[in-house]
Image (cartoon, grey):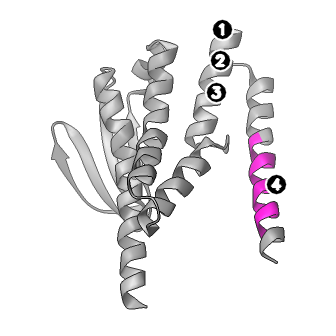
């Protein structure tokens, strides 16, 4: 049981970090400056610099993030924006295939599929916003609210379905 817990914890952290590194390297390929890499949320425990990127470790190790120059990303061609936003998902799908049948593979599949759902601040939502803004040539608050609320409804329906199937 202890080994399973250690495996799950390490697999979860590795999945998060590798997902964010996908975004990081895609941003670098597209010449979008990265300001900060972080593991966790909440108060900062410590930080260090790597190639002008502020790397932070935070108290609650339940998330990870890459903070890029959003102005530069938004000025990039649409295909580059989608490449950067989708790179984490792509990394998770590749890792899922390479480690199929393992707990690490399951975590990668879950993170990839979860990020495809257009839930607020996830990669699917950000990609949807980029596409909508490009289609309309500008931000459209009505369309963006519809995408945000619709994404929430999709997420809730998936959760409800999962609960019903497991009851």
Check residue 157 in the rendering and tell me which mark sits there, or answer none: 4
Check residue 137 in the rendering and tell me which mark sits there, or answer none: 1
The magenta stretch spans residue 100: no
The one of 159 and 166 positioned closer to us in this rendering: 166
Identify the magenta region: 151-163
In x, y percent, where is residue 47? 23, 55
Instruction: Give the structural element (helix, strand or loop) at label 3.
Output: helix
Q: Look at 42% across and 64% down and name the residue there.
A: 104
Q: Look at 48% across and 22% down and name the residue there.
A: 81
Q: CA distance from mark 4 to mark 3?
A: 21 Å
- Disc 3 target residue: 129
Disc 2 + disc 1, Cβ < 8 Å: yes
**In the image, is residue 124 above or below residue 5?**
above
Q: CA distance from mark 1 to mark 3?
A: 12 Å
The one of 117 and 39 positioned closer to us in this rendering: 117
Instruction: Give the structural element (helix, strand or loop) at label 1.
Output: loop
Which comes sooner in the sequence, label 4 or label 2?
A: 2
Q: Left or right of 15: which side holds 142? A: right
In x, y percent, where is residue 107? 49, 61
Instruction: Give the structural element (helix, strand or loop) at label 4.
Output: helix
Which comes sooner in the sequence, label 1 or label 3?
A: 3
Q: CA distance from mark 1 to mark 4?
A: 31 Å
- Disc 2 target residue: 133
Q: Look at 42% across and 82% down and name the residue there.
A: 5
Q: CA distance from mark 4 to mark 2?
A: 26 Å
Q: Nearer the viewer, mark 1 or mark 4?
A: 4
In x, y percent, where is residue 103? 45, 68
Instruction: Give the structural element (helix, strand or loop) at label 2.
Output: helix
Disc 4 + disc 3, Cβ < 8 Å: no
Q: CA distance from mark 3 to mark 2?
A: 6 Å
Disc 3 + disc 2, Cβ < 8 Å: yes
């Amino acid at each position: 049981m202890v080994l399973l817990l250690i495996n799950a914890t390490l697999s979860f952290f590795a999945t998060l970090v590798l997902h964010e590194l996908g975004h990081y390297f895609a941003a670098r390929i597209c010449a979008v400056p990265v300001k900060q890499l972080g593991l966790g949320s909440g108060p900062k425990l410590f930080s260090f610099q790597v190639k002008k990127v502020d790397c932070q470790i935070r108290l609650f190790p339940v998330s990870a993030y890459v903070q890029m120059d959003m102005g530069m990303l938004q000025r990039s061609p649409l295909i580059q924006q989608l490449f950067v936003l989708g790179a984490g998902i792509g990394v998770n799908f590749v890792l899922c295939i390479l480690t199929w049948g393992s707990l690490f593979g399951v975590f990668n599949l879950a993170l990839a599929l979860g990020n495809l759902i257009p839930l607020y601040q996830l990669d699917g939502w950000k990609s949807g916003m980029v596409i909508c803004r490009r289609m309309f040539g500008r931000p459209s608050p009505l369309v963006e609210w519809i995408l945000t609320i619709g994404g929430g409804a999709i997420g809730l329906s998936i959760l409800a379905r999962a609960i019903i199937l497991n009851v």
